[in-house]
Amino acid sequence: MQVQACMIDLDGTLVDTMGDFEAVVALMLQDLGLPPLGREHLEGMVGKGSEYLIQCVLQRQMPSAEYAQQHIGEIAQPSEAQLHQAWEIYQAHYQRVNGQASAVYPGVLQGLQGLVAKGLPLACLTNKPKDLAQKLLQQKGLAEFFPLVFGGDSFERKKPDPLPLLKTCEALGFAPHQVVMVGDSSNDAQAARAAGCKVVLLTYGYNHGLPVRGVEADHHLDSLAEILL
């Protein structure tokens, strides 16, 4: 693809952070006195920001959730107070756990080195809070590749809204059609198409628990190293 710059997602694209999510959610539920949640359920909840993840977890694990599903056929909605409490607990634990149970995917380092060698400016664009994203990139030895890092709290809206991509393209100094979004989910693809960017999806990520090859994209890759081809 003829592009001038590259935006790259973090969770599920550069780093496998599911272990971090699993550990933090387990600690949060323990503090809230709620039953644990299996990893298989979490995979469908990750990718749309911490607020979305926490809401989904509480909806599933609150004592009223099972009753609501069985007797009313509706999803139990946590209150604002419950969400705020869970958010505070979640953030406190994530600050401590961040990066401890995660690993850089194979091929990522080679892919980033190749993109830099081609002279492409890079930006990390994630729905993870910016502070946590920067710390994770630093911890995993990837920070040097990203002079620009934008998180879920950097703009008024998160992916799949196109706003973060449009703002990142502006910061990179290129028009959207000159920039490619590299991610692992329909979130990234939907945002890229709405913004007018090209999109490449990695097949090993999360994509809300669904096969990402079913999501329309310019290319599907099994490794970031393949982006050099």
Image (tube, helix red, strand yellow):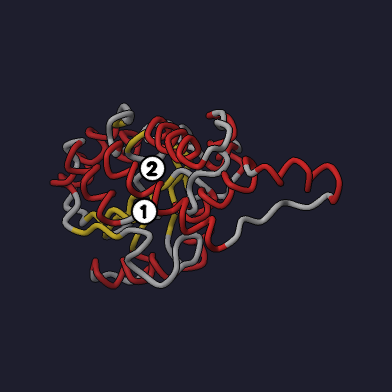
The residue under the point 56% across, 52% down is 55
Report helix, strand or loop for mark 1: loop
Marks 1 and 2 in Cβ contact (< 8 Å): yes
Question: What residue is disc 1 on?
Answer: 126
**At which x and y percent is residue 225?**
30, 34
**At which x and y percent is residue 153?**
35, 63
Q: Is residue 192 above or below residue 156?
A: above
Residue 57 visible, this orientation = yes
Which three-letter amino acid code belongs to the residue tagged 2?
Answer: Asp
Q: Compute the Cα span from label 1 to label 2.
A: 7 Å
Q: Is residue 31 above or below residue 36?
A: below
Quarter of the picture containing the C terminus is top left
Task: First in sequence, mark 1 or 2: give its number.
Answer: 2
Question: What residue is disc 2 on?
Answer: 11
Q: Nearer the viewer, residue 60 or 162?
A: 60
Query: Is 17 on the left-hand or right-hand side of 174?
Result: right
**At which x and y percent is residue 99?**
28, 35
Q: Nearer the viewer, residue 154 or 229?
A: 154
The quadrant in which residue 93 appears is: top left
